[in-house]
Amino acid sequence: MDTAALRLMKEAGLPGLALAIIENGQVSYVKAYGLRNVEKAAPLRTDTVMYGASLTKAAFAYMVMQLVDEGRVDLDTPIERYLRKPLPEYSKYADLASDARWKRLTPRMLLSHTPGFPNFRFLNPDGKLDFKFDPGTRYAYSGEGINLLQFVLEAGLGLEVGQEMQRRVFDRFDMKRTSMVWRDDFAANVSQGYDETGKVEPHDQRESVRAAGSMDTTVEDYAKFLAGFMRGEGLSTRARAEMLRPQIAISSAHQFPTLLTETDARNEAIALSAGLGVVLFNGRAGPAFFKGGHDEWTDNFALCLERERRCVLLLANSVKGPAVFPPLVDIILGETGMPWRWDYNPPPVE
C-alpha cells in the first residue's frame, strides 16, 4: 500500500497525502506521505493540521443528531418554529422575503441537501440567495443549507455551534488538534494547499465557525471520529440509523456542478441516495457511505462499509486527489462499487 501511495502521488504530482484505515470500528493504520510545505521541504505528519473542508458536514450532522436524541431538534419541524422571527427578517436571509418557500424548510432537508438552494449564494450572478427548486424535491449539494441549520441552532436555540462541536465531537473523541476555527498552536505544524498547477495557497486561518466547512483537523483526529461513529458511540441506535437511512434518491449524473439536470440510470442500481450529512450507496460489500471535501487546494475523502465497520480516510493538500484516491481505495478496501463517476466531474480516468 505504501509503495502504491507513493507511486500514485508521484504520477499525479500530489505534494502530500495522509491516510487512515479503520477496521472493526478501531483505527488500525495511520500514515502520512510527502510534504506539508513544498517550499520549505517540511514533511507531512499524521498530526499535521489540514483543512477538513466539507468533511466538516458529516461531523456537524453527527452533532445535530445528538440534539435530536435529546429532543431539542426535530428533523421534520419547520425551521420557522425555532426562530424568534420570520427567517427573511434576519438580514442574512432577507433575499428570501419574496419567496414563501422558506417556510417549508426543515432540518432534515438542510442535512440531506434538498433545500432547493445553490451550493453557495456567491455562485449566483447577483450574489443573492434564492430557491432553484421546491424544497425537498431533489438532491443538490448545498453548503448554504448546512450553514442555515447552523444559523437556526444559534439564533433559535441559543447554541454556539463551535462550542457544541468542541464538546460533543472533538472532546468526545480526543481530537486535540481539531477546531472549527484557527488556533495559533496549529501554526508550527500546518499544511499549505496547492492548486492544479502546483501553486501554493497559504492555509486559511478561519476566524468564523461555518458548519459547511471551517474545520481544521488531522488525519489522526478525524480517523478517531470515524472509528467512534462506526462503533456507534455518542448516538442512540435510532439516531445513527436515521443518519444512514436513504432520505431521497439521487438521480443526478454528477454531484458538481450542483444544479445540473443530467441524470444517470446507474444510480438506481446502487441505490445512490442522500443520508444526513453523508451520501449512501449499496456496493459489493453491502451498505456504504462516503463524504468528500474539496476546494481549489484541498481534496479529502472518507468511505465506510457498514457491515464490516471498515473505513478509509484520505486527506490531500492538493486538488489532485481524484487521480490518487480511487485506485488507493481499491487497494485498501477492494472493489467497493464506489460511484466515482458521480462524486467527481469529470470522473477520474479509468
Image (cartoon, rainbow, N blue to C red):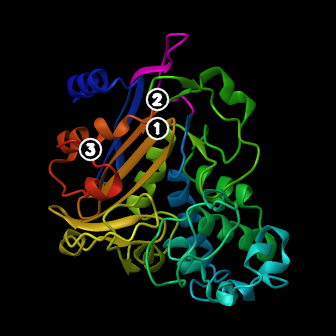
- Judge whether residue 25 can be spotted in this image: no
In three-dimensional space, the C-alpha distance between marks 3 and 1, rounded to whole angstroms, equals 23 Å
Residue 75: name its quadrant. Answer: bottom right
**Magenta run includes residue 211:** no
Q: In the structure shown, which secondary structural element does the residue marked by tag 2 occupy? A: loop
Can you give x and y, in whole percent of width and height, for residue 207 in the image?
A: 76, 43
* Residue at image point 67% right, 84% down: 102
Depicted 120 relative to depicted 107: above or below? above
Is disc 2 in contact with disc 1, using a CB cutoff of under 8 Å? Answer: yes
In three-dimensional space, the C-alpha distance between marks 2 and 1, rounded to whole angstroms, equals 6 Å
Amino acid type of disc 3?
Pro
Disc 1 residue crowd, few under 14, some 14–19, many 20+, Cα 10 Å? many
Report which residue position mark 1 lands on: 219
Disc 2 residue crowd, few under 14, some 14–19, many 20+, Cα 10 Å? some
Can you give x and y, in whole percent of width and height, for residue 273 in the image?
A: 34, 73
What is the span of residues highlighted in magenta in the rendered image? 33-49
Depicted 198 relative to depicted 274: above or below? above
Amino acid type of disc 1?
Val
Q: Earlier in the sequence, mark 3 or mark 1?
A: 1
Which mark is in front, 2 or 3?
A: 3
Q: Earlier in the sequence, mark 2 or mark 1?
A: 2
Residue 348's disc is: 3
Amino acid type of disc 2?
Thr
